[in-house]
Image: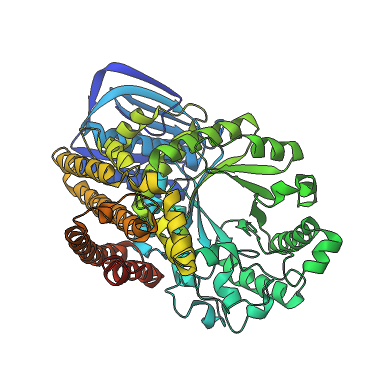
Amino acid sequence: MYLLPVPKEVVYRESEYALPHKAQIVLAQSCTQQVYEYALLLKESLQECGCSCSVRRGGSGGTVSLAADESMPEQKYYLEIGEKGIRIVGGGDSGILYAVQTLRQILQQSGLLLPHMEVTDWPDYEVRGFYHDAARGRVPRMEWLESLVDTLSFYKINQLQLYIEHSYLFAGMSELWRDDTPLTSDDILALDRYCQKRGVELVPSLSTFGHLYKLLSTTQYRRYCELPDAGGQPFGFKQRMDHHTINVSDKDAFSLICDMIAQFLPLFSSKRFNICADETFDLGRGKNKERAEREGKDRLYMDYVKKLCAFVTEQGSTPMLWGDVLLGFPQLASELPEEAICLNWGYAPDQSEESTRIYAGTGVRQYVCPGVGGWNQFINLQRSAYENISRMSSYGVKYGCEGLLNTDWGDFGHINHPAFSIPGMICGAAASWNAGELPEYERLNRQISVLQYGDASERFSGLTGILSEQVSFGWHDAVLLKELWAPQGKEELCARLEESRAQIKTGPQKCKKIEECIHELKRCTRTMEGAKRRMVYPYLLAAQGIQIFNQIGELLLDAVCGDAGCAQTDFDRADAGKNRTEFSRRAYDTASALEEWYYHYRTLWNTVSRESELYRVSEVIFWYADTLRERVAKYTW
């Protein structure tokens, strides 16, 4: 029996309880109306097992009884499966929900014949969150967002934040979102209501300081940018990440940001608001250079953040902000409002505890924020994410942090399929419920394979983790080569490729490993639940994408560096003409394979995401297809 997150206390008995084919869920008078929503979730699971099921309030008897006990902590629960039926007691609505989700996991694996058992359980972190990028590439479809909320709730995650820069339909700001497919007020209100039904707090998150590319590139608002040439540069994924910080000295700019907050905040029932305020790379480098030299960048940053926090507080919300900039001058953290929450992020597999220790020393409220390792990857780096989440979770408990917010970014167009973040999300759920006691990596993958993918062989999630490690020339490399290295000419491009020669040359070996994983993933379909077999296809498609870009890396290395005397290649041998012809054929074939792959990738994208910035991804894909035909195949670098 696999349960995630792993309960604190579980006692199994030898006997079993056979569910009646006519089941009844009984809500005690102590249950709120919200608990009825949780009873409906349980009813659906019972029906999937083969029961007829009804729900009633009050009275005795019933197959499953749900009750609240105010003497218990809100999120604690007790679940008993015995001879007379199933009993659930929670400290509040949350505790009852978590007991229901544990029971649903048991039903999923045991069907109508359940083990006699007792579960007593509670979380280590009060807040266990998930942060999803809904701006820099993908704007999710509502159906996918609802399925995400269902998954979060199933694994007892109780907070969701969507990262927004420009992807909300702000009134009077059509130039900001005109070439996008933004979320609307109807979308947010509906999602907030859906989250409430699943016991998840939807927290608004809006860029208000740095990372304002679209806003500060518009004709209407570019004058508010710190750098004077905003909007004058062609778009680049790297350019967007590095620049576009607001002018903190411009009163009209601050008024604009406040207006955006005032439009966005009332759509949420949450009383928290994330102002972001991270990676303000250009602060004090342009219009505020003299002021920064006079007062210091730390002063510029803190004065602006304090104004933002004050405005959010005036609206009745608790401000939250990313902690990377403030880490440079933690002595000023005491100037934040007492209720403000610092989001302390760090994504390395060997992440240090230093930042967590520093913030703990300031006395500021703090969440630790690891990541699911998906940005700039075709498939999320599952092992790296596991190591990162495990470390950050343990640091948070050591230093008394209030929550864990597991992050899922979309840098460089959000190339990975959003569902690939689910293993890392489940890892975060397990780590925040039982901080410092995460199952070892292979065991966790077996548990995820069963619970999430319905794979009785327990191999699926382990295989996808192996697939993610087979990159020799990936999306991050591809974007940087197109945007930064290639425009500088052959010499610079060759130098960059030579730096990665050893990695690129592992391509054939890694492509062979990909083929082995593809074969084994297909084997998993023999042991997967029927409806869940559809989860295999996105991974197979992503694996093909990794293979194609691995091949592109090899072709580029040979074409760009082959005649430069950097290394011996096929072109240096006596049969150069024959080798050149074969090389050209490979380049043309790879270009065609890339375009055919992208056709299917685009189709899959549209099943879970709005059109959003797919066109920016296509620009990179088509540039490589054209380059393979026009320059690589003809060896004209």
Total numbered badges shown on the rendered structure: 0
Which colour scheme appears in the figure? Answer: rainbow
The answer to whether residue 538 is visible is no
The answer to which image quadrant residue 314 occupies is bottom right
Q: Is residue 617 above or below residue 108?
A: below
| Residue 361, position as x, y percentages in the image | 74, 36
Viewer-side residue, 223 vs 7 = 223
Residue 616 occupies quadrant:
bottom left
In depth, the one of 160 and 351 nearer the eye is 351
Q: Furthest-front residue in view?
A: 574
> With 383 as the anchor, is 114 left or right in this view?
left
Q: Position of residue 229 (x, y in %)?
A: 64, 77
Q: Is 546 located above or below residue 435 in the figure?
A: below
| Residue drawn at the location 25% of the way across and 34% of the way down | 459
- Tell me what residue is drawn at x 29 percent, y 72 percent: 630
Which residue sits at x=50%, y=73%? 235
Q: Which quadrant of the rendered structure holds the C terminus? A: bottom left
Q: Position of residue 388 (x, y in %)?
A: 50, 38
